[in-house]
Image (cartoon, helix red, strand yellow):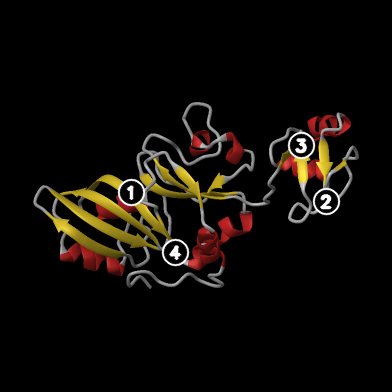
Amino acid sequence: MRIDKILANIGYGSRKEVKKLLKDRVVEVNGETITDAKIHVNPEKDEITVYGEKIEYKEYIYLMMNKPAGVISATEDLREETVLDLLELEDAVYQPFPVGRLDKDTVGLLLLTNDGALAHRLLSPKKHVPKTYYALIDGTVTEEDKSAFQEGVTLDDGYKTKPAYLTILRSGEIRSEIELTITEGKFHQVKRMFEAVGKKVVYLKRISMGPIELDNRLEEGEYRELTDKEVSMLKEGGGDFPASKGVE
């Protein structure tokens, strides 16, 4: 890979700015000063330094965020704070984007990456990637609701959802706690599913996506890189992800 592309990719500026660094003789590869932007190096084997500081190059970045309420799942917005605004510069330079979206008032697990192929796979309707949510519901959630979700409910636009698995954690007269696993991602789907059975979601948190579970050590607004094991779990699914909690 060309040295100017490597340095530009990890945030040392535009190609023009990188060329100035090279001209200023502050870039070395394996101890040798490099001034030619077209020189090819292997970032996995060669030692690259800028101003004497060794750089670590990676092509892809994989992040897990505990998205807070009030922040939108977008790369940029003129009026609203986005999830990218929460990233440190050292991570933002890789230009990751959210894998799917969470509603502005929904919190919890959001994956961000610049690996377009993996993101496409996770979002493909053909892959049936399970997503599990914890929610507080106004009213009493019943076994009838559980059966209805398993069969699929009809949303306000006439769309019938795929089977979903509803776990009732606590059912009260005023408020219920549930977990719901779905394998699709229609607009406001969880909220609209409960509206279809006459109930309202008052709090919604995504706790897992595919094989990845939200790290409960992350406070809302915090994030971390996925571990190598977690990345492998996402990549090694091969075909469809396995059904989760009885969802088919």
Circle 2: residue type: Val
Looking at the rendered image, the disc whose residue lies closer to the viewer, 1 or 4, is 4
Report, in whole angstroms, how far the alpha carbon at label 4 lies from the one at label 2.
35 Å
Q: Is residue 110 among the parts visible in the rendering?
A: yes
Circle 1: residue type: Lys
* Residue found at x 49% / y 47%: 224
> Quick one: label 4 or label 2, which is nearer the N terminus?
2
> Quick one: label 3 or label 4, which is nearer the N terminus?
3
- How would you rate the neighbour count of disc 3 (Cα within 10 Å): few for under 14, some for 14-19, many for 20 or more? some
Q: In the depicted view, which residue is nearer to us: 184 or 217?
A: 217
For residue 211, the mark is: 4
For residue 41, the mark is: 2
Report, in whole angstroms, how far the alpha carbon at label 1 lies from the one at label 3.
42 Å
Residue 75, x across and y down, in percent: 55, 38
Looking at the rendered image, the disc whose residue lies closer to the viewer, 2 or 3, is 3
Query: As drawn, is 92 to the left or to the right of 224?
Result: right
Query: As drawn, is 82 to the left or to the right of 220?
Result: right
Q: In the depicted view, which residue is nearer to us: 158 or 123?
A: 123
> Quick one: label 1 or label 2, which is nearer the N terminus?
2
> Quick one: label 1 or label 3, which is nearer the N terminus?
3
> Quick one: label 1 or label 4, which is nearer the N terminus?
1
Q: Residue furthest top?
A: 79
Q: Is residue 197 among the parts visible in the rendering?
A: no
Residue 55, x across and y down, in percent: 70, 43
Q: Is residue 13 above or below residue 29?
A: above
Residue 159, x across and y down, in percent: 38, 58
* Residue found at x 88% / y 40%: 34
For residue 50, the mark is: 3
Query: As drawn, is 130 to the left or to the right of 140?
Result: right
